[in-house]
Image (cartoon, coloured by chain):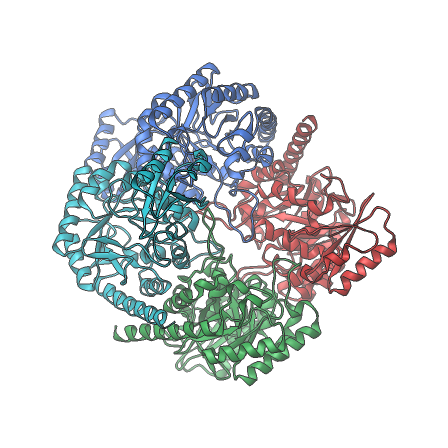
Chain colours: A red, B blue, C green, D cyan
């Protein structure tokens, strides 16, 4: 990481960047009010740091060993305020801002009627962003894979429904990208691109999605520690896209004997991650618990833990859903959840202000 | 499980119990307003169920296969209301009642002055129960094991300090029992006996503690699933003592790469356990996170998840503590936590009343 | 699954297949000496089984609920002998045959000289197949990603070296495919396509690789249970490609306190998987342990557990390797390993013959 | 740790030991051919190391930070040869010596006839030590807990059968101690005291068992990492008893989806532990897999990994066993296992001699 002098010229900055590129790396430039810093992207062992320190305009050269430096507070503290978090604006919605954000919608899009009816329901309940799965990752090739599993035309039709429903009910829309070949098409229709937990480690997919310059929602793999989660978010940042929304959605349950939730909802990861990175983090109680009857409490818990928002699978008739019916809530239940979460968020804000 | 007829006589009940004992099992009798049920404790394969069904006064014989039947809602629904939870009264404190309960105090008791000063601080902060470790379970024989590690006299002196501090500041007191040989002495001084996570599987210790007929706080082992946790609570109930307070305190972290919390705080276990058993469950954010800077948020999250209370390690000067200083809060911080938790609890209650 | 009558005609078979396709599924046809069976690929809920049972030539219709039915012994028992395993022939090498197969080579290909020198070394040590990484999956974007991380030309040059080294030393070659966009190029140069542990869940990549009709080596994700591992192998089989070599390479370590191996080598999975599927399974002690000093013993253990072969990272000078030096063995060490493994394999064969 | 000068007198040694005791710690004295070392047992922060360095006869004072120093190779290298392992002699059997040792017998002792018949069978199969459970740790209070679960008289009778069967068939005997109150009685009848996995963390039990001065077999808890396993073995060593046999018996399985073994048999722990400690380590494939059909292969794998022996549950009629029938082998199967294991051990020895 190179810290430029406050009075460094653009030319001096360009010289530094060119030197980095000459060594086969990329440069990540962050401009603060007083300082500009240049992060290195790639294998740092190739860079002659001692030579770079002597370049005109360079104030200081620092080595940051953490693998997720571009998104770390450690790195950003030179250009922004200590506790500042990144706010990601998507149409009329701010993620990571003062209010928690609620993403809702069906697990899988099944028909135009279904997505419109659900969109209407969640809007009335207070949700901000509409989700709907089209390319569903599934553990069995013999399960329903979403409309994307039937064919490209069906997938594109579903994308259009999603986009139109978002427009009609004034919500940005999000869907999951499961493979590199889907990136181009999906990016034309949605506002936020989602990488699912199973694909978190797919670095080529991450890079390709990042280059669309749309916000990316990255779910934590159920086998990933926090350091690995952030290190793969770094693959997106390394492409120059820092509009990344992290999402905790449950990790592999451990413990002898039967468990009673589908995954272990690692809510301690929420504030722990907020100490490490300025990126916003939301939580997904639907996948974490796999149980409709636990979603109210675990939504409240996630907001109390400090999450910037929630993603909650919603369906007007959970019993009829083709996928994941047992973990969906109705729009009416969603409303209660959102109301309670907003109050809990207010409580946190007021206690923090006081202290 | 034997359900007696509403008009069964005491003699008929005694006959049933005797038949059970004759087969080498014990009987757990629960009397409700209208019905009395008799649970079997021990290896059910030895019991002639078909014969028992014919006994006078017996209404029905049911097999409940869950290993924690005595503490299960399934079992208790015949004698109590569906959603009723057990309220455990200790002196002036109700655990599992309408208000969350806060247990606080030092990880390890170090001196009389220390325990009195901390007791005063947590009382002022709003805590209800005073904790203090004397026999500390430690991963290394070369670490400080609490005053109990020095000798029996030191241990007994520390127990006296704890008892006196509890009396002076009007709080029931709790400490951990680590081995069978400590049970008798500790039970003379404290109001609640704690079984630590490392001893959860120690069935002989559980039985011996249970027989003291004092409330028992049982912490979940960090390698135990929910079913195993409840199955070992059943060892206490099987001795006729159902004054059991369960405590979630974090499970083994999984996930490649470094993690940032000491354990994974499994808050989803809180409402999941409440669906299974009528026993109250509290949570311990201090051990779960191992990080002072996460305790405020994770305390709020635990209460939002539905916990009946919290156990929080507290010290007036965390940096000076001989054990676990990095995860202690000050009495001032505890006050903020308790205030926020109470408000969150109110929010949950008001939303539930409305719906 | 549809079992055809022994005397069913080709036309009757075609009718069955067409009916399956009409319902949006694919058919997997296996012909045995006496029976032909047709497996369904896709969402079975869409298929009118009762109608299919009445088709001419159909003997029986069975539902197999396991998610990896196409590769299961349960499914194949109608057409092959009970204990038969699939033998995969690649040039002069049989994987899953009577002798264990040894795959060796560098973690990452660094130069033509390096790959040729290592190829010569492992050939002399008794290895059968040459491996070499070009697109390296890495946890950090700031680490060396293999020559594929530098550019497509460099990647293609490395592929050519690998192919030429294989030809010169008469060994088939294998490398890892990390993303969909790499499939076409890599398939032109190598004999076996490898899917790494991190990509095991990438169903779109699996399908694309499968369609190249070359053998696929699929590594188990470190967070995947056996059922999930086999269910994702099924994604390859569902494309009509059953030349799948499974590979156990270690799973996430659990347990409080420091561990001493990089992953937990789950050797019990080897015989457990062999009871479920007819596919061959090999093991990778290099990644599982991450420790050069454990590889001899754990190689022997894997063969004793019943593995059909091993993949072992080898370098003439481990200390110089750019990636994973701490887990590489030299060709001389490899020779000892192969010699010991062959003797252990002989012991197993002789005991089994006797009993 | 204090290294005494080669010519230090007994008096000088005594002075050092007294100084250690004065500070509330204990001393562990190891005498080698040339050097004597004194290890500190307890909280080292209390010891004035700089003062001790000046004591007459003291050569050097070293701090060893590992929590299992008394059993570590690091510590013992001053008094024994680098690769030497501790050999534990029990009657006619050497554990940790040149040949692998086989411990076999029923999960639970059910009758005199049963234990004698099994003892005869395993002796003929080549086993060296007879096991039999009396106080069975069980996950459910409603399961059969061994004869110890019925009463003390029944337990003592079973201990007598075990002892007599051992005498008749000339094998040392071992059984599990589950609680502190059982130590005295069990120690009168058996040659080796076993601490089961569930009690590994029970430090008071470990200390009490250690003080019986009989060999102790300590099983790894299924939630313990290697460092914790060794740190709890240190509790035994700290009592002056280093006749400790470690036993790997499987850890909590991780991984999404169903698994197919009861635990994950962590065979990589075997050589990893041997690098850390001079204590012998054996393995228990019965509990690790929970599957009779995997025991042959996993026994071979454990010996190939370097284990000094195996503990295998054996019954003449597994289907009749009251506990764990699904994981028992017959004496005939045991014979095949022992034969194969001995050959594999020979192979390892011959390869190691050569290299």
Q: Residue A44 location, x and y as percent?
A: 68, 59
Quadrant of the snapshot with the C terminus of chain C: bottom left
Compared with A281, B101 (above or below) is above
Q: Is residue B267 visible?
A: yes
Q: Can residue A279 be seen in this view?
A: no
Tell me where residue C322 appears, x and y as whole percent. 60, 66
The quadrant where residue A197 appears: bottom right
| Front residue of B269 and C197 | C197
The residue drawn where x is 71% and y is 58% is A41
Looking at the image, residue D27 sits to the left or right of residue D331; the answer is right
Q: Which of C90 and D63 is in front in this view?
A: D63
Q: Where is residue B65 in the image (x, y as percent from the top left)?
A: 34, 44
Q: In this view, does C259 lie above or below B318?
A: below
Q: In this view, does D131 lie above or below B114?
A: below
The answer to which quarter of the image holds residue A355 is top right
Q: Nearer the viewer, residue B260 or B297?
A: B260
What is the count of numbered marks? 0
Q: Is B14 situated above or below D153?
A: above
For image coordinates 38% across by 26% down, the residue present is B215
């Amino acid at each position: 990481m190179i810290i430029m002098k406050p009075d460094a010229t653009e030319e001096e900055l360009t010289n530094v960047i060119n030197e980095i590129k000459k060594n086969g790396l990329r440069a990540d430039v962050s401009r603060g009010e007083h300082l500009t810093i240049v992060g290195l992207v790639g294998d740092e062992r190739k860079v002659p740091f001692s030579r770079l320190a002597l370049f005109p305009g360079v104030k200081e050269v620092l080595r940051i060993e953490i693998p997720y430096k571009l998104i770390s507070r450690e790195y950003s503290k030179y250009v922004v305020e200590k506790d500042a978090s990144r706010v990601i604006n998507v149409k009329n919605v701010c993620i990571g801002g003062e209010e928690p954000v609620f993403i809702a919608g069906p697990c899988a899009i099944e028909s135009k009627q279904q997505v419109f009816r659900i969109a209407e329901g969640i809007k009335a309940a207070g949700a901000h962003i509409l989700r709907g799965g089209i390319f569903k990752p599934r553990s069995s090739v013999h399960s329903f894979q979403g409309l994307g599993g039937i064919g490209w035309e069906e997938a594109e039709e579903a994308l259009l429904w999603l986009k139109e429903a978002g427009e009609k009910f004034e919500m940005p829309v999000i869907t999951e990208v499961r493979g590199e070949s889907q990136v181009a098409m999906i990016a034309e229709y949605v506002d936020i691109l989602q990488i699912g937990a199973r694909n978190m480690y797919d670095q080529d997919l991450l890079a390709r999605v990042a280059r669309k310059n749309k916000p990316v929602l990255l779910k934590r793999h159920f086998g990933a520690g926090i350091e690995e989660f952030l290190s793969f978010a770094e693959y997106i940042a390394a492409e120059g896209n820092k509009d990344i929304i992290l999402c905790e959605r449950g990790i592999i349950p451990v413990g002898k004997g039967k468990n009673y939730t589908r995954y272990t909802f690692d809510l301690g990861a929420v504030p722990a991650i907020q100490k490490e990175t300025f990126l916003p983090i939301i939580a997904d109680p639907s996948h974490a618990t796999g149980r409709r009857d636990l979603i109210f409490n675990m939504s409240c818990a996630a907001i109390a833990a400090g999450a910037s928002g929630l993603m909650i699978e919603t369906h007007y008739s959970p019993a009829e859903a083709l996928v994941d019916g047992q973990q969906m809530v109705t729009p009416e239940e969603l409303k209660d959840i959102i109301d309670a979460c907003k109050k809990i968020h207010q409580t946190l804000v007021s206690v923090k202000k006081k202290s």
